[in-house]
């Protein structure tokens, strides 16, 4: 029930005239809607790092990626609409934008960031989908940093290789909680 932040949260809810409903502590059945979502989310998020070979430290982007795809493809409720259709009132038709988490990509390198003779594209790994582009982990930067640089590049100029998962294909990447 989040006692550590209850006072501030209750004040904010009261300001906005929103009633607060809580479940009983240690009784997940009293909050069935959220528990059902977690029962859907956990297996989906759990299988993505296994398929892609991505280290577990990327669980945050994995959750965002799974939720983005789920909200656009899986019909829920009695009306059999996706959450996207329910919110925007139209069907999500841009399904070619959906690609597997952790797949290999080539992303365009801007002219400002490269010299005349450098390659125009760099290898990366898909870690997220946004409304107007993608989040990419630049593979070379990640390796050079000793697997510490987790800064994502945001771009829409990407070529996807949906069947290739660089982390899963190389033994030198350690998956256990880097």
Image: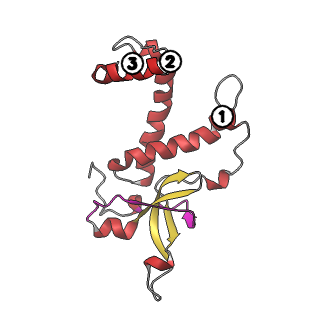
Mark 2 Cα within 10 Å, few/some/many (few <14, many 20+)?
Answer: few
How many tags in the picture?
3
Say which residue label 2 marks: 18
Mark 3 Cα within 10 Å, few/some/many (few <14, many 20+)?
Answer: some
Residue 163 appears at what percent x and percent y? Answer: 54, 60
Dot 2 or dot 3, earlier in sequence = 3
C-alpha distance separating marks 2 and 1: 21 Å
Of residues 64 and 172, which is closer to you in this image? Answer: 64
Residues drawn in magenta: 146-166
Say which residue label 1 marks: 87
Residue 74 appears at what percent x and percent y? Answer: 63, 36
SS for dot 2: loop
Q: Is residue 91 one of those drawn in magenta?
A: no
Residue most toward the front?
15
Residue most toward the bottom?
117
Q: Nearer the viewer, mark 1 or mark 3?
A: 3
What label does residue 10 carry, if any?
3
């Amino acid at each position: 029930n989040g006692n550590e932040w209850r006072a501030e949260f209750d004040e904010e809810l009261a300001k906005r005239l929103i009633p607060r409903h809580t479940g009983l502590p240690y009784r997940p059945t009293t909050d069935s809607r959220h528990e059902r979502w977690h029962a859907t989310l956990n297996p989906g998020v759990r299988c993505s790092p296994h398929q892609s070979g991505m280290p577990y430290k990327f669980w945050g982007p994995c959750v965002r990626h799974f939720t983005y795809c789920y909200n656009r493809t899986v019909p829920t409720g009695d009306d059999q609409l996706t959450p996207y259709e329910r919110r925007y009132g139209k069907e999500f038709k841009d399904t070619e934008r959906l690609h597997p988490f952790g797949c290999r990509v080539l992303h365009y390198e801007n002219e400002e960031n490269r010299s005349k003779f450098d390659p125009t594209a760099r290898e990366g790994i898909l870690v997220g989908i946004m409304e107007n582009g993608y989040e990419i982990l630049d593979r070379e930067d990640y390796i050079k940093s000793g697997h510490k640089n987790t800064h994502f590049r945001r771009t829409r100029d990407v070529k996807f290789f949906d069947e290739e998962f660089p982390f899963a294909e190389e033994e030198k990447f350690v998956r256990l909680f880097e």
